[in-house]
Structure formats: structure tokens, C-alpha cells
Image: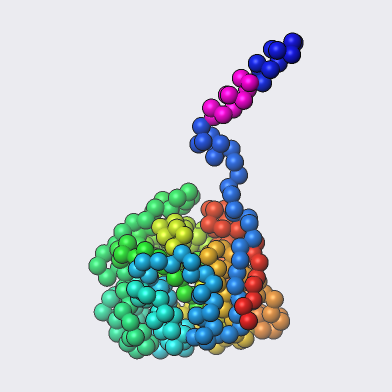
Amino acid sequence: MSKGFKRVLCLLTVLLTCAVSPAVWAAQAPAAGRDDAAIVYFTKDISPAGLLKIYSKVNGGITGKVAIKIHTGEPHGPNILPIDMVKALQQSVPNSNLVETNTLYGGGRQNTADHRDTLKVNGWTFCKVDIMDEFGTVSLPVRGGRHLKEVSMGKDILNYDSMIVLTHFKGHAMGGFGGSIKNIAIGCADGKIGKAQVHGAKPGDGYDKWLSKDPFMENLAESAKATVDHFGKHITFINVLRRMSVDCDCAGTSAAEPVIPDIGILASTNIVAVDQASIDLVFKMPAKQKHDLWERITSRHGLRQLSYARELGMGGRKYKLVSID
């Protein structure tokens, strides 16, 4: 083969390579950033000042009208987030209010009227609380979902430009643990349609027929993805590790008394990393202190929330913990 022919062949190869469409290149390239180490901020200061300080580290994408997603809890629940902390955050964020949805199960939040009574009982009276499914529902797509193609959400989620996911990290009867993933996966889904989709429940089903373990964890991750994708870069996540009962705040006054000490507050713009870091801090506690919560998480296969969320491209489980104390 002559040198001239070789040059022509090389030139043709380059031209053909450059002609490949960007879509083909994208398909050939690995998912970018999924395993990059995210920054997770940490403070031991569980107070209004501590919450405001850590929020300032992760608020870069929070603009416009802001939804602060909390768990309002059943009446007189002993473990809900302290009112003074939530109030301090809400009053520091312009054009913001708290958001929630009604529940699938019975109790003090199964419909809007009862839910509003519970808001008064529990002290959520310092600002507007938008019960997002009060006036209807909207379906958000689950991009890449294997089980759910869309999830029915409270319609008012469309009224917000940004979301702060403010979570009381604790155990959960079915999910093993309730972190940021659970807070929006169940908490943004509307009370009757969306929550039934996530739980795999049909009308008349008892709790024993709802999904559990891996199938439920995967539905949680897919539902959370719908909300994360909806807000894009305008969503951030804060986990408060205090009063960590093995039971969710939906258990109200029947929740088991926590045996693990309070740890602190974690914050990140990566939902997977903030929940992973919360789990790691819990699991590093002495065996006697962590046992009940560890058993609740592992027996329900709770960690599948994290591995499946990573598979969905919601973020990596690697992180760098940065103390702000």
C-alpha cells in the first residue's frame, strides 16, 4: 500500500468518524457523573442556626416559587421536625411555603379537612401549607422506569419552580428507612392514586398485599425520580438525623421510642449521596445504639432504594463528607 493511499484512507476515516451523529456518540458514552463523589455537608448542630447554615451550602439552584417538602406527621407525633427549625428555614427562603399530600391509609391526614386539623394540632400554622392534591392530580413521567412509567402527583407541584426536600431521617415500617428518597417518593404522590401506584395497592387490598422489600424499594426510587427530574437542578436535599425511631412519623404517638442518639444534619444536591451518608453515619454507631434501626433497615431490604436509584441515574453512592462545624 503506497503512502499516498494510506493518507487518503486516514482522511476518509476521520471524515466518516466526524459524521457520526451526536446521538450515536451519546449512546456509546458511559453515563457521566453517576459515580462522581458528591459533596455532602454535615453539622452536629441540630438547631435553627445549624439548619440555616447547612442550607446555605446547597441552595444555589433554589429560585422562584419554592416548595419546602416536609412530613407533617400524624396528630401529636413526638418525633416530627422541631417547629422552630422549620419556621426559621421557611422564613429565610423568599416566596416559599410548606407542601404535603394526603395519605392512602386512614388517620389524621387521609383527607384535606382532617389534614388541616392535624396541621393545627402539630403546630404547622406559621405559614401556608399547600396540600398539593387538594385540588386534583397530575401525572409526571418516570424516565427509564422499569415498573412505573408515570406517577400521579398532587397537582400543585406544577406551581413551584424549586423544591427543598427537608426530611426527618428515621426508620419506616415498609421502606426500612425514610430519607429524602422516601420523602418525595410517597410524599409528593397524591393520597389515593399515586400512593397506591407506589405501594402496588388496589382498592380493597389490605397492607399484607402491598409491595414489600425489593419491589417496593424500586417503586420508591422510580417515584422519587419523577420529582427529581421534574425540578432538575432546582431541588436540594436536607436530612435531619434526630429522634430516629424505627417508625415513621406516620405512626404518630404509637412510634417506638428512639434508642439511637441524635447525630446531626446532612445536606447535598445529590439525593442518593445524602441518603447513603445518613445510612453510613447510623451504621457506624455502636451496636447497642444502632441495633433496632439497623435491623429495621436491613430486614426490609431498605438499601435497595439506594442501589436502584443509582441504576436509574439519580446519582452515585460515593460522596465526600464535609463538616461545616
Name the spot of residue 181 as percent of width and height, x first. 50, 66
- What residue is at 53 percent from the left and 79 percent from the top? 53
Type of secondary structure dominating the magenta stretch: helix
Res 132 → quadrant: bottom left
The answer to whether 14 appears left or right of 166 in the picture is: right
Residue 265 in view (yes/no): yes
- What residue is at 50 percent from the left and 80 percent from the top? 52
The C terminus lies in quadrant: bottom right
Name the spot of residue 323 as percent of width and height, x first. 64, 76
Residue 303 in view (yes/no): no
Res 156 → quadrant: bottom left
Along the viewing direction, whichever of 162 and 274 lies nearer the viewer: 162
Name the spot of residue 17 as percent of width and height, x first. 59, 27
The answer to whether 141 appears left or right of 276 in the picture is: left
Above/below status of 158 relative to 263: above
Magenta residues?
Answer: 11-20
- What residue is at 39 percent from the left and 53 percent from the top? 141
